[in-house]
């Protein structure tokens, strides 16, 4: 994760492209989000034709999604590429993407959830920083704080520190390192591939949606057994949306309990309760590869550099 190149900032009026590399896009939510994105970046906003397509549980065939994504990543005058939504499908495209045009014309790639896989590819294949942030279909529901934070990152600024809400702290202290944010299950799915960045020396930020506590236990155990957490300096846990079992017996472990138990043996600061991920009305944007400082005792994540230059 060290040494990733910061792409240029995204000034107002810069060309921004939207693609859908994963699931089919719900039109009403997309249109609302697109209006918000236009207010953030200006009118020079290009939506790939592929965004309106559907093939099974994808936004078009693998070829259609790959071609649209590759074209956006390669475009010399494009400053940023936003994902229209998450879902599933990016991992099917990674082996067929060419990072050379993106290295030649660096740009900021923005998304989260399934797009975690693309952000990891941007880091490992192109050597660039990226932004773990809202997809377009989420923008219409976000509050002003999250939109301001996203705008700051795009403009090449450093937003204020992010504080956990009702967080649990394990092994307090202060640690620094490049940030590696992502969806837990997507990170797990990259295990054994060349696309999973090393977490050694990094601060990991993870979130999850719709996974029962036992499935979260399985994913964390897999990553622990595979050595993914070896050398990690700290972990921040975001929203665990819809990860509780309403039929669980009294005393059954919650999703947060599983994180505390599984990661409590790492011997590094672990803080839960940060406001990023799949909650319906919040998702604080986080840099991929930029240095941060975790103040575990204060449950605060401080950003030390812009994600862009």
Image (cartoon, rainbow, N blue to C red):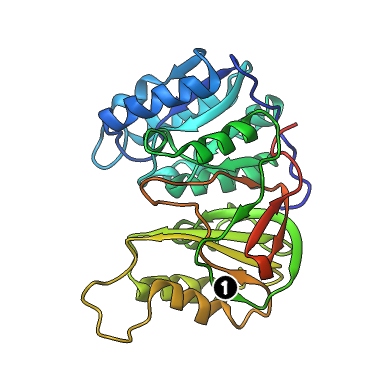
Residue farthest to the left, as pictured: 247
User: In front here: 231 or 282?
Assistant: 282
- Callout count: 1
Residue farthest to the right, as pictured: 3
Q: Position of residue 126 (x, y in %)?
A: 66, 39
Q: Position of residue 264 (x, y in %)?
A: 58, 81
Asked if residue 83 lies left or right of residue 137, the reply is right
Q: Residue at x 33, y 40 (%)?
A: 23
Q: The C terminus lies in which quarter of the figure? A: top right
Q: Residue at x 59, y 74 (%)?
A: 169
Secondary element type, mark 1? loop
Q: Residue at x 38, y 76 (%)?
A: 254
Q: Badge 1: how crowded within 10 Å, few (<14), some, or many (20+)?
A: few
Q: Is residue 113 above or below residue 8?
A: below
- The residue at which mark 1 appears reads as 226
Asked if residue 277 lies left or right of residue 109, the reply is left
Q: For residue 41, what is the image quadrant? A: top right
Residue 60 in view here = no
Residue 89 in view here = yes
Q: Position of residue 46 (x, y in %)?
A: 46, 17
Q: Residue at x 53, y 16 (%)?
A: 42
Q: Position of residue 34 (x, y in %)?
A: 40, 24
């Amino acid at each position: 994760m060290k040494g990733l190149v910061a792409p240029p900032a995204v000034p107002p009026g810069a060309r921004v492209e939207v693609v859908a590399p994963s699931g089919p896009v719900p039109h009403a939510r997309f249109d609302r989000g697109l209006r918000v994105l236009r207010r953030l970046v200006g009118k020079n906003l290009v939506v790939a034709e592929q965004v309106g397509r559907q093939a099974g549980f994808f936004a078009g065939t693998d070829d259609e999604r790959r071609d649209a994504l590759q074209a956006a990543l390669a475009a010399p005058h494009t400053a940023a590429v936003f994902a229209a939504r998450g879902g599933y499908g990016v991992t099917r495209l990674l082996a067929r993407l060419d990072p050379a045009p993106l290295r030649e014309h660096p740009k900021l790639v923005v998304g989260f959830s399934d797009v975690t896989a693309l952000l990891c590819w941007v880091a490992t294949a192109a050597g660039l920083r990226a932004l773990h942030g809202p997809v377009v279909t989420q923008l219409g529901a976000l509050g002003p704080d999250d939109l301001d934070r996203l705008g700051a990152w795009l403009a090449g600024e450093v937003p204020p520190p992010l504080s956990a809400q009702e967080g649990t702290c394990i092994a307090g202290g202060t640690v620094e390192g490049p940030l590696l944010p992502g969806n837990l299950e997507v990170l797990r799915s990259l295990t054994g591939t060349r696309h999973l960045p090393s977490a050694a020396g990094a601060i990991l930020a993870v979130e999850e949606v719709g996974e029962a506590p036992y499935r979260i236990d399985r994913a964390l155990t897999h990553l622990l057994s595979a050595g993914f957490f070896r050398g990690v300096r700290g972990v921040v846990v975001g929203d665990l949306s819809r990860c509780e079992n309403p039929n669980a017996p009294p005393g059954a472990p919650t999703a947060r309990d599983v994180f505390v138990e599984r990661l409590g043996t790492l011997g590094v600061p672990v803080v839960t309760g940060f406001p990023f991920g799949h909650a319906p009305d919040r998702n604080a944007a986080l840099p991929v590869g930029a240095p941060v400082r975790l103040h575990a005792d204060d449950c605060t994540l401080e950003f030390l550099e812009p994600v862009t230059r």
